[in-house]
Structures are given as structure tokens and as C-alpha cells.
Amino acid sequence: MSRSPKLLSLMLLGFVLVSLPLVAALVTAIAKVDRLARETRNDMMAVQQNAVASRGFLERATAMERSARQFYALRDPSFLELYEEHRQAALELLNQLGRDAYSPELVAVVNHAREAELKVELLLLEAIDGVPEKATLEAALEAFRQQSLAVSREQNTISRQMASVLPDKASRLQRSLIVQAALAIPISIAVAAIFLIVVASPLRQIGRGIRALGRGALGEPIQVSGAHDLEELGQRLEWLRHRLVELESQKAQFLRNVSHELKTPLTNIREGAELLLEERGDGNARELTTIAQIVQANSIRLQKMIEALLRYGAEGDLAAGEPDQPVALHDLVAEVVERHAQVAAARSVELRQDLQPAVVTGSPKRLQVIVDNLMSNALKYTPPGGHVNVGLTAGVGSVQLDVHDSGPGVDEQDRARVFDWFYSGPKPPDSIVAGSGMGLAIAQEYAEQHDGRIELVPDSGGAHFRLILRMRAT
């Protein structure tokens, strides 16, 4: 089964995917603008160079025409040399214009200019011997001049065309960038909307689950599908819902048990009181004493149950906001044993203790209640002349407290119920009041709150209870 990505990973992926179309559009726009600028710069430089070459050629052609006329009129070889000098420069410029021509028309006029110049060159060579007539040379020079002007005009036309092409290229680029933006922005918005739905859906599920817990709808399962950490949060909320269901069930059962257990002694007290009222002094002393003993025993039992409930609630409230702290368990056990020493001495019960130093993490008040309830239970069922052994042993990662009395022990059929609320074993022989049935249940609950447990250890004689807690240090 593939593991869902975490919320942070989804957010980073969403940011990348949302930014990707915009970044692609931006990079493409930069590349197109750079290409347009580079092409424009190259075209403008080429056009400028051709324009300069065209003007230079026209100047050279004019100089060639002037030198040719002077040579024909004076027959001075120096003018022919000057003509040749201007001719070489003009041919180089024509070659440049033909090589860098931007249109076939310019190539054509350049070729025509070469042909016209060649005719003039041949006529001048013939003029050395005085063969061509002046009219023939004039016609050739005029044709060369017209072709030179045609070259200049065609180059000017190309320059004007290039100047008009640049705005067209810019307009096309602008339209292309607008289309890219029109595509990139909706794509980014669509991707952002998809990821918003993906992230918002589990958040809404979590919100519905929390609202359901808030209004007490504990029967609705909490299911969250999406990012891995949000799914974990949903699983914790589902665990919390199950825990609340269990607590609600325990509370209902607790209230039912409390109602039942409190009702029993109250009924006995009421019946005893009614019997006393019915006797009106006519009964014998033995019957009155029996009735009074019933009333007294049930009133004491009721008082103990109410005191245990109040103490349980008060100690729970006092320790609820108390942070866990290191507790020297050997000192705490020694204090509890010392507090019960007087009661043990009055009943001729020997207290034996063997305590090793041990430190655990937890609530001192609740740990004290655990030890106190175990000691009270042991002393209550230990007959006169018996003994109670208290041993504290520090192991590897845990600490173990054993409270072992020499009483009658726990019957086999009662072992599974000894930690149930309001369950009390047989009444001790020397006690007229049965136990409240809450001491061991409270001790077990407090032990579980400390990641520990209380066990009833099988033993040949007496009751042997063992508390196991997680140890902090030794």
C-alpha cells in the first residue's frame, strides 16, 4: 500500500506545479524578446552597412564618370589610373551589396550595374587608340549612372521595408506573449484550484469530526483521506472518539453501580429506622440492639463509600493539572507504611519492609493513593498476630512493589473480579462493615495512568498484590 504524501510535500508540489506554467511562459517570453532584439540588431547593422556601401558606390560611380570624361577629353593616362582606382573601390562595394542583398531586386540591379561598368571599361580601353565616338561613350556612362542610381534607390527601398518590418515583428511578438499569458494564467489557476480541493477536503473532514465530537455525536466514525500527516491526525481523532465512547460507557456504568451500591445501605438504614419506629419501645433490648447495629453498620458503610468517592474525585482534581515529576518511590512507600504502623500495632499485625531506592515518573498524590489502598486492603484482611510484607525492587527499566499479607487470600472464583468497581470480597471476621469495593479499582486505574499495572500474584497463603511501574532512574 503506497503511503500518502505529507501536507508540506503537497504544498511544495502544488507551488511548483502552479509556478511551472508561469515560469515557462516567462522563460519563453524572455527567449523570444532576446531573439527579436538580436535579429533586429543584426538586421539594422546589415542595412546600415549596405546603406553606407550604397552611398559609397554612388560616390565612386560619380568619380569614375568624371575621370572617364577627363581621360576621353585629354587622353591623359593619369586620369585613366584615377578611373581604375575608383573602379576597384566601386567593384568591392558592389560585391558587398550583392553578397549581403536582402532582396533579389537588389541582386539584379547590382548585376546590371556591373554590366554597365564593364561596357564603360571596354570603351575606355578602346579610347586609348581613339576608336569609340564620344556619343557611344556618353551613352555608356549615362547607362552606368542610371544603374548606380538604381542600386541606391533599391537599397533605400530595402531600408524603408526593414524599418516597417520591425514594428510588425514586435506586434507579432506581443500577440504571442498575450496568448501565452492567456494560457498560462488559467492553467496555473486550475492547478491551484485542484490542490486547494486536495488540501481542503481532509481539513473539512477533520473539521466535521471535531464538530461531531463537540456536539457529542460519538457514533459517527471519523475518516480522513488525504495527506499522510492529516490522515494521522484523523486517526488520532478516531482514537479519541473511541476513547470518549469508552469513557462515556464507563461513566454510565459507574453511575449505575454507584446508584445501586448507595441504594443498598440506604434501604437497610430506612428499614431499620422503620423497625425502630414500629417497636416504639415495646421490643426487647436484644432486638433493638440488633436493629441499631444494622443501622450503624450500613451508615458506616455508606459513609465510607461517600468518603471514598469524594476522596477519589478530590485527588483526581488535585492531580489532574499536576505535571509528571520524579518521585522517590522508596520514601513515599516508607511514609505510607509509617502512617499505617499505629493501626497495625493496635491489631497486633507486624509490618515488614524491604525497600530498595527507586525513582519513577508520575503524580506523587496518585502514587500515594495506590500504596495507601494496597496497605489498607492488606491490613483489613490480615488477622491479629499476622504480618504484612512490603517489598520494593528496582529492576531494569521498571520498579516492582509487592504487598503480601498473611490473611485468608482471594478465592479462585473472585480473582477475575477483584479490581472491579464496587466489588468487595468476604467481610473480614473482626469487622462489622464490608469494604466499599472501590480501593483496588481506584489503585488499578491510577496505576494504568502511570503506564503500569497491579497484579494479583498466585500464592499459597494470603493475598499478594504486585505494582509494576516504569522506572525513571535508580
Image: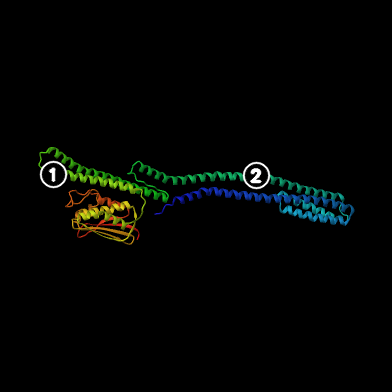
Kind of residue indicated by mark 1: Thr
Q: Position of residue 228 (x, y in %)?
A: 41, 51
Label 1: which secondary element:
helix
Q: Please state which of residues 138 and 181 is positioned toward the viewer in this rendering.
A: 181
**Residue at which label 1 appears:** 289
**Residue at which label 2 appears:** 168
Q: Position of residue 6 (x, y in %)?
A: 44, 51
Q: Position of residue 21 (x, y in %)?
A: 53, 48
Kind of residue indicated by mark 2: Asp
Quadrant containing the N terminus is bottom left
Q: Is residue 181 left or right of residue 322?
A: right
Give the crowd class for mark 2: few <14, some 14-19, many >=20 residues within 10 Å: few
Q: Is residue 209 left or right of residue 259?
A: right
Label 2: which secondary element:
helix
Q: Residue at position x 65%, y 44% from top?
A: 168
Q: Residue at position x 16%, y 41% from top?
A: 272
Q: Please state which of residues 430 and 27 is positioned toward the viewer in this rendering.
A: 430
**Circle nearer the N terminus (1, 2):** 2
Above or below, 142 relative to 385:
above
Residues at marks 1 and 2, CA–CA distance in whole angstroms: 122 Å
Residue 113 appears in view: yes
Quadrant containing the C terminus is bottom left
Residue 128 appears in view: no
